[in-house]
Image: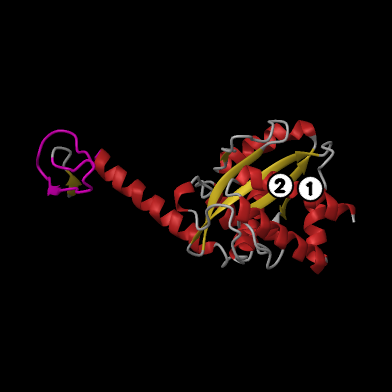
Amino acid sequence: MAVMDPTTAGSRSGQVNLILRGTEPGPRRLFSWAGIEIVVRLIVVLVATVGRSICGAADVSQPSSRTWHTELVRYRLVGQDWEHRTYRGIGPHPADPRTAEVAEQVAAMIADTVPGTVAEHVGSTAVPDMIGKNIVDLQITASPDEVPAITSALLGLGFAWQRDRDPWPPERPMVEGTVHCRDGVFLVHCHVVPATDPDVGQMLEFRDLLRRSPAARRAYAQHKLRLTAGTADPLEYTRAKTGLIRRLLSG
């Protein structure tokens, strides 16, 4: 019978030598740590490949697709692949339709993991043809006592705590991660907003305004172009947009 020889099996070189043992005394070892490591690596590559190809191809309305999403989430396909993101800096970048697919897939994953939880697609990527950073923003609205449990579940999916120098407070957290979709790597920001927050509806209201008003879309896009001509700092850029957003929402 062909078995792995623990004295000759490569450890990190990935080479495993097989020998025939039929009469040698002593207990037979069918596996070595090197062999197990190789098998695990092959499984990880296979799962990652399936996860990346399913984005944009699966119909999340079908039960079979939901099952696949649930299984893929368990392998933490939301990660922190920061260095390989498709879009870097504040742009503004042209709209990328893959961001809508990412939002749909991640929202389905969250719903599978925390039943009853709705992750709304907000921000510029939720508005067709809107230029921006191409970061996928999601908002989960929850009662204050549910925020810690939902945040913990998101971290379990592979999200990480916000890395910015001025993060959102823990009672209104934002977590972030990356998702692979059709040869792209997209940054996802997931905001968990307590229903008691005075600005709980702002991102949703602004998204809806931009979707229905061409004039608001033009004003917002032009404002972004002016801001990016004067700064490359993401935090400064985000803060500078606040005034216009409030003015547009006030009518």
- Part of the protein shown in magenta: 8-32
Q: Which residue is mark 2?
A: 240
- Whether residue 68 is in magenta: the answer is no
Count of all numbered marks drawn on residues in the image: 2
Three-letter code, disc 2: Ala
Three-letter code, disc 1: Gly
Residue 162 lies left or right of residue 17; in this view the side is right
User: How many residues crowd mark 1 within 10 Å: few (<14), some (14–19), many (20+)?
Assistant: few
Residue 15 lies left or right of residue 195; in this view the side is left
**In the rendered structure, are the residues bearing label 1 and label 2 in contact, judged by CB atoms less than 8 Å apart?**
yes
| Residue at x 76%, y 47% (from the top left corner) | 242
Q: Position of residue 148 (x, y in %)?
A: 69, 32
Q: Position of residue 95 (x, y in %)?
A: 62, 65
Q: Which residue is mark 1?
A: 243
User: How many residues crowd mark 2 within 10 Å: few (<14), some (14–19), many (20+)?
Assistant: some
Viewer-proximal residue, 74 or 197? 197
Q: Position of residue 44 (x, y in %)?
A: 40, 50
| Residue at x 19%, y 38% (from the top left corner) | 28
169 up-or-down from 98: above or below = above
Residue 53 lies left or right of residue 239; in this view the side is left
